[in-house]
Image: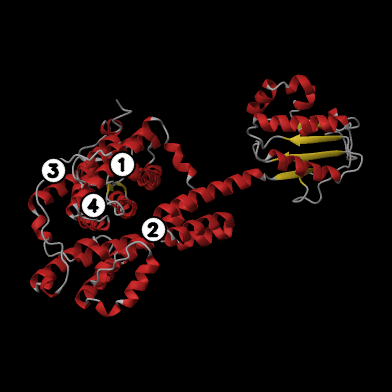
């Protein structure tokens, strides 16, 4: 039971007196934060604002029951909303019945993909997307999200919606059309949100902005002078909905569904890990996929759209004292009450306010420091970040993440195809063997070459390894033996073994003998299966470099020192 209902793990230790106090406080604070955010992110996704509230109810309850994180706040997030708009707007006009139907189908597909990944224990797949790629993609997507809201901020219907360069160009051309009251509301909202975010963190800035701007717009009837407002937000509980299962639509939505499923999981799991490590309880990647998958399947049948765990809301939930998933259930209940009794309060909410909430929320996702940090430590990782960032900005969301993943894989292949190899020398003072390029005092001899290979050996790097060994051998005079330190080799494939065996045989014909030292157990098992131990004997089974040296003719005192 615990496998499918992780909440059974924490409910047994739940302290109704102490834990519930923190949960109810956190649940109410997150609900106050999520109501305007949910509406804003629905607008970003090209959907009616009320769908953001629908997506903030039942999915939260489902995740609380099936997810393993006790403080993760699931619901609409900016990144997923942008991906929804990117993937579905090319198939239907945003806001139409057809568009909404496709979004419901997309939510169902995302849920099924995540659930299947969890069932088949594919949570580790997220590790193949490097942090550099995620950082570059997130930063670029944040800029795209912010720029996509400019039209609501200035009150001008900008036709360009994704390419920021086209948006900037169109704004420059139509600068005289800017609606001044809308711009004032939008910029004022941004400044208020930033002020409360930095100076008055205990009070939700979004609540202050929403209440003040609704009051202002209602009191002065700003909609009559051209300020776009939300207008009627339907009341009542989310209606049951059925995704339109159409094969053509499924094929068209499959790429974006996989992108949302993986990116959403990576974002969610990263935050869940941070909180779990602080609170010292375990989380499981595959169970997290189950929880997110079931939440997304649930939202597809209740007029919602794809959801995942959000960074900022989860942080607020945790800081506010959330002790368990009950905090998320309280958030969902509070939003359900809002849908039943308080939706009329949002009639005069200016769309510029929702745009401001989105802009301020995604501003923190732009991570310039990470680019400089990676450049300082490992420049190729910084290049991966910049390639992903530039491609996402110039071409688009899907192309950006795909390019980043492919580029990072190519970098990995390139690195593994040219593994680090070190010629070793003996340091008498410490009685150790060290890399001669790092320890110039390390002593070597011309008739014995000692080399450490610091990588697994496979078909793609065996040629480089042989070439590097040959280069080092050519520098020796009167070479009699080569000792390969295999302490850094974790695996070797059949193709590499065949090539290496041929290389060893060629050297043997020239009366140069190869010894393997400090070979790890799993690699030694493979060598035995391949018949190397039988073919080459104890040359392949040296426990240390010293023992290999003593098997070589004249191996004693070959550095002019006592036996070691």
- Figure quadrant of residue 166: bottom left
Which residue is under mark 4?
Answer: 30
Q: Which one is earlier in the sequence, the residue at label 2 or at label 4?
A: 4
Query: Does residue 148 appear left or right of residue 333 in this picture?
Result: right
Q: Nearer the viewer, residue 75 or 466?
A: 466
For marks 2 and 3 on the same chain, the one whose residue lies earlier in the sequence? 2
Q: Position of residue 213 (x, y in %)?
A: 16, 68
- Point out the frontmost of discs 2 and 1: 1
Q: Which residue is mark 2?
A: 141
Q: Secondary structure at mark 4?
A: helix
Query: Could you tell which of marks 4 and 1 lies nearer the N-terminus?
Result: 4
Proximity of marks 4 and 3: CB atoms separated by less than 8 Å? no
Question: Which disc number belongs to residue 239?
Answer: 3
Observer-nearest of 76 and 164: 164
Between circles 3 and 1, the one closer to the viewer is 1
Sequence order check, earlier mark of 2 and 1:
2
């Amino acid at each position: 039971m615990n496998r499918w209902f992780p909440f059974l793990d924490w409910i047994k230790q739940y302290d109704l007196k102490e834990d519930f106090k923190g949960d109810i406080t956190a649940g109410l604070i997150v609900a106050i934060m999520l109501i305007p955010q949910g509406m804003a992110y629905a607008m970003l996704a090209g959907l009616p604002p009320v769908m953001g509230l629908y997506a903030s109810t039942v999915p939260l309850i489902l995740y609380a029951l099936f997810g393993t994180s006790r403080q993760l706040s699931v619901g609409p997030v900016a990144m997923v909303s942008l991906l929804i708009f990117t993937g579905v707007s090319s198939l239907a006009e945003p806001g139409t019945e057809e568009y909404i139907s496709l979004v419901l189908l997309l939510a169902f597909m995302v849920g099924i993909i995540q659930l299947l990944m969890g069932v088949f224990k594919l949570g580790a797949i997220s590790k193949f997307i490097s942090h550099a790629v995620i950082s570059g993609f997130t930063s670029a997507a944040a800029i795209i999200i912010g720029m996509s809201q400019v039209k609501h901020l200035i009150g001008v219907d900008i036709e360009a919606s994704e390419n920021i360069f086209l948006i900037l160009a169109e704004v420059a051309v139509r600068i005289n059309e800017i609606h001044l009251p809308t711009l004032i509301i939008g910029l004022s909202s941004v400044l208020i949100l930033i002020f409360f975010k930095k100076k008055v963190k205990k009070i939700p800035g979004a609540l202050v902005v929403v209440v003040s701007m609704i009051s202002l717009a209602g009191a002065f009837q700003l909609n009559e002078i051209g300020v776009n407002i939300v207008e009627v937000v339907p009341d009542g509980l989310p209606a049951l909905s059925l995704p339109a299962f159409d094969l053509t639509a499924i094929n068209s939505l499959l790429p974006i569904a996989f992108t949302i499923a993986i990116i959403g999981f990576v974002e969610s799991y990263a935050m869940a890990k941070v909180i779990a490590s602080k609170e010292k309880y375990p989380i499981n990647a595959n169970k997290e996929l189950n929880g997110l998958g079931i939440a997304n399947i649930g939202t597809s049948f209740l007029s919602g759209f794809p959801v995942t765990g959000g960074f900022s809301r989860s942080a607020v939930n945790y800081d506010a004292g959330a002790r368990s998933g009950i905090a998320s259930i309280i958030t969902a209940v509070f939003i359900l009450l809002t849908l039943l009794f308080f939706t009329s309060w949002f009639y005069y909410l200016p769309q510029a306010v929702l745009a401001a909430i989105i802009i301020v929320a995604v501003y923190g996702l732009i991570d310039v420091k990470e680019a400089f940090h990676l450049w300082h430590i490992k420049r190729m990782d910084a290049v991966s970040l910049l390639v992903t960032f530039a491609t996402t900005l110039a071409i688009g969301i899907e192309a950006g993440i795909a390019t980043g993943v492919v580029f990072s894989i190519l970098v990995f292949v390139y690195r593994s195809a040219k593994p680090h190899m070190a010629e070793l020398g003996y340091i008498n003072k410490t009685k150790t063997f060290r890399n001669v390029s790092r320890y110039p005092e390390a002593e070597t001899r011309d008739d014995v070459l000692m080399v450490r290979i610091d990588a697994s050996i496979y078909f793609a790097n065996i040629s480089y390894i042989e070439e590097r060994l040959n280069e080092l051998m050519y520098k020796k005079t009167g070479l009699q033996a080569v000792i390969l330190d295999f302490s850094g080799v974790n695996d070797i494939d059949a193709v590499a073994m065949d090539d290496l065996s041929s290389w060893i045989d060629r050297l043997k014909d020239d009366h140069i003998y190869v010894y393997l030292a400090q070979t790890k157990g799993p690699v030694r098992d493979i060598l035995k299966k391949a018949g190397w131990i039988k073919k080459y004997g104890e040359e392949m089974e040296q426990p240390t470099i010293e023992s290999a040296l003593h098997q070589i003719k004249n191996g004693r005192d070959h550095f002019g020192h006592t036996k070691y």
